[in-house]
């Protein structure tokens, strides 16, 4: 698995770094010893290599593979991939309530609206990793606030910027956020793609027929109204940032294009507005987030 992004933090300045934008001299003079996994939940440090044949890449510092969270694609553990896959299958197949998902989204929105970027070093210090797939009994600080692992909401849903999404994240449940670039609605088959910002891959939010299968939650006609409003706002050049929770899958027939499957209207926000708020008000707020 190729690590394409890293997070730079020297205690004062922060920056998201793509390995192709580095060279050996720049790395050694500024970034060495200050790069971390792009995931907020990981403690692992990242190093940069620039070979004589001009090949560049990121990798985890030696001996720190298990400092990635177990849900990070770059986690390495002495038990091996078979045991890790078993643990991940249990995590990703575990049911989560709509309330838990909504709280995750609302709190991610609150975090993104903060005037100061979240202190990632503090996040690393307070986030507790699972050990062999089991949770500790203490209260944990996570994306959606404080939960007790003995309570009903035991599953942590970590966040991921759409521009950092790679095929390594396929089959993970994530709270994905990013700018909407384009909308495609196949009215005949009844599904929607909201294409997101990503320079390397095609990443979309996918709203299948299951999205409106329960008429008590929404209908196809309501979805049409929602899609038309999103299209209008994009044509007016308004920045639209979606935050949603869903499983990441490859698009059918592709090994690169990725979809985030959203199966309920309560599993998304756009510019800090809920699905039905957009429909009933026939408007979408301006982008409230400082760093997107």
Image (cartoon, rainbow, N blue to C red):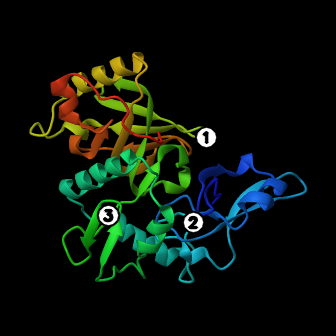
Of all residues, the one furthest to the right in this rendering is 52
Asked if 35 appears above or below 113 in the picture, the reply is below
Q: CA distance from mark 1 to mark 3?
A: 28 Å
Rendered location of residue 43, percent (x, y): 54, 71
Rendered location of residue 229, percent (x, y): 28, 21
Identify the residue at image location x=58%, y=71%: 44
At numbered mark 3, what does the secondary structure look like: helix, strand or loop? helix
Query: Callout 2: 10 Å neighbours few (<14), some, many (20+)?
Result: many
Looking at the image, tell me whether mark 2 or mark 3 is earlier in sequence order. 2
Looking at the image, tell me whether mark 1 or mark 3 is earlier in sequence order. 3
Identify the residue at image location x=22%, y=78%: 150
Quadrant housing residue 65: bottom right
Looking at the image, tell me whether mark 1 or mark 2 is earlier in sequence order. 2
266 and 289: which is toward the camera: 289
The numbered dot on residue 93 is: 3
At numbered mark 2, what does the secondary structure look like: helix, strand or loop? loop
Quadrant housing residue 288: top left
Q: Which residue is mark 1?
A: 200
Q: CA distance from mark 2 to mark 3?
A: 20 Å
């Amino acid at each position: 698995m190729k690590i394409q992004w890293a997070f730079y933090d020297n205690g004062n300045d922060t920056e998201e770094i793509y390995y192709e934008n580095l060279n050996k001299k720049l790395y050694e003079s500024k970034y060495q010893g200050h790069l971390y996994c792009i995931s907020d939940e990981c403690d692992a440090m990242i190093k940069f290599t620039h070979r004589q044949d001009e090949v560049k890449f990121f990798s985890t510092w030696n001996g720190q593979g298990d400092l990635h969270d177990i849900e990070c694609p770059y986690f390495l553990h002495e038990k091996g991939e078979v045991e890790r896959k078993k643990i991940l299958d249990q995590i990703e197949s575990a049911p989560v309530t709509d309330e838990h998902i909504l709280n995750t989204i609302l709190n991610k929105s609150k975090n993104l609206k903060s005037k100061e970027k979240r202190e990632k070093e503090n996040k690393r210090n307070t986030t507790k990793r699972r050990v062999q797939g089991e949770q500790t009994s203490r209260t944990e600080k996570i994306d959606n606030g404080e939960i007790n692992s003995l309570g009903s909401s035991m599953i942590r849903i970590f966040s991921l910027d759409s521009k950092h999404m790679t095929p390594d994240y396929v089959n993970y449940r994530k709270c994905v956020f990013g700018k909407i670039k384009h909308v495609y609605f196949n009215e005949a088959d009844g599904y929607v793609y909201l294409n997101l910002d990503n320079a390397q891959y095609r990443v979309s939010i996918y709203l299948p027929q299951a999205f409106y299968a329960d008429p008590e939650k929404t209908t196809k006609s309501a979805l049409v109204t929602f899609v038309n409003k999103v299209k209008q706002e994009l044509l007016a050049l308004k920045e639209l940032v979606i935050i949603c929770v869903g499983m990441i899958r490859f698009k059918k027939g592709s090994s690169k294009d990725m979809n985030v499957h959203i199966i309920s209207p309560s599993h998304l926000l756009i510019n800090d507005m809920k699905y039905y708020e957009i429909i009933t008000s026939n408007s979408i707020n301006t982008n409230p987030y400082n760093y997107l």
